[in-house]
């Protein structure tokens, strides 16, 4: 955009030109600018609603467009939205001809296309999240999103990332004599009795197979405590 000075009767007037050399309507340009600012503020207000915390906040699963996981995670962080993007450590592909090249592991999404958020289910929240570039929706739909329990989040964090804090919480929640349900592996859906809570997020349980008691070693993330 450039400015030129032209004569109109007896007064000098500055005219702004666009890249094509056409005159720019300054009043209309200001109106569009004001509209963009207003929309931006509205989007920020709605996104701020997604960052609200309270007793009604629950975990939900966002769907993310391909390759946008890290960008969406960053946008959620900047909006102060509690979130968790599961990551795993992998070695980058080795370049051809560099067999002795030292490769450092990098973190990459373990569940690409999905990010967990803890928010209050309300229209303003979902409208705000929808303004994030790369957001593709929420599991269950914004009108009836499907919540995920905090225990399930802890299990995923312990199982996928071996998160020490998640493992500690799960370990402290169980003790010998507790009844659990096995959620994964060949004994899935079996009821069991905790015999030992060991280290390294392992437990030993007793269940019954063909009418006989048998002991099984499992990971903490593989069981759910029964009330």
Image (tube, rainbow, N blue to C red):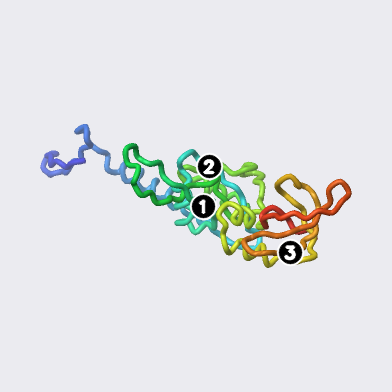
Is residue 62 in view? yes
The residues bearing labels 1 and 2 have C-alpha atoms spaced at a distance of 23 Å
Q: Which of the two residues, 14 or 108, is positioned nearer the viewer here?
A: 108
Snapshot quadrant of residue 165: bottom right
Neighbourhood count class around disc 1 (C-alpha, 10 Å): few under 14, some 14–19, many 20 upward: many
The residues bearing labels 3 and 2 have C-alpha atoms spaced at a distance of 37 Å
Residue that mark 1 sits on: 46
> Which of marks 2 and 3 precedes in the sequence?
2
> Which of marks 2 and 1 precedes in the sequence?
1
Residue at horizontal 17%, vertical 42%? Answer: 3
Q: Secondary structure at mark 2?
A: loop
Nearer to us of marks 1 and 2 is 2
Q: Which of the two residues, 84 or 103, is positioned nearer the viewer here?
A: 103
Q: Position of residue 49 (x, y in %)?
A: 54, 56
Residue that mark 2 sits on: 113
Instruction: Answer whether labels 3 and 1 touch (C-beta < 8 Å).
Output: no
Residue that mark 3 sits on: 196
Instruction: Answer whether labels 1 and 2 touch (C-beta < 8 Å).
Output: no
Q: Is residue 142 above or below residue 207?
A: above
Residue at horizontal 51%, vertical 50%? Answer: 88
> Which of marks 1 and 3 precedes in the sequence?
1
């Amino acid at each position: 955009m450039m400015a030129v000075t032209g004569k109109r009767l007896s007064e000098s007037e500055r005219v702004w030109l666009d890249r094509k050399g056409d005159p720019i309507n300054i009043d209309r340009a200001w109106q569009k600018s004001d509209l963009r600012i207003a929309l931006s503020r509205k989007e920020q207000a709605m996104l701020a609603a997604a960052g609200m915390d309270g007793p009604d906040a629950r975990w939900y699963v966002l769907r993310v467009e391909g390759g946008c996981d890290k960008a969406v995670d960053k946008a959620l962080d900047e909006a102060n939205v509690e979130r968790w993007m599961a990551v795993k450590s992998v070695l980058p592909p080795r370049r051809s001809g560099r067999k002795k090249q030292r490769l450092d592991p990098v973190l990459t999404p373990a569940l690409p296309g999905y990010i967990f958020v803890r928010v209050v289910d309300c229209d303003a929240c979902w409208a705000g999240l929808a303004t994030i570039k790369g957001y593709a929706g929420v599991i269950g739909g914004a009108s009836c999103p499907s919540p995920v329990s905090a225990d399930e989040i802890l299990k995923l964090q312990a199982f996928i990332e071996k998160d020490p804090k998640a493992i500690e919480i799960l370990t402290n929640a169980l003790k010998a004599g507790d009844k659990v349900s096995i959620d994964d592996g060949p004994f899935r859906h079996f009821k069991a009795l905790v015999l030992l809570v060991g280290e390294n997020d392992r437990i030993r349980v007793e269940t019954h197979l063909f009418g006989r008691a048998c002991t099984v070693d499992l990971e903490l993330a593989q069981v759910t405590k029964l009330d």
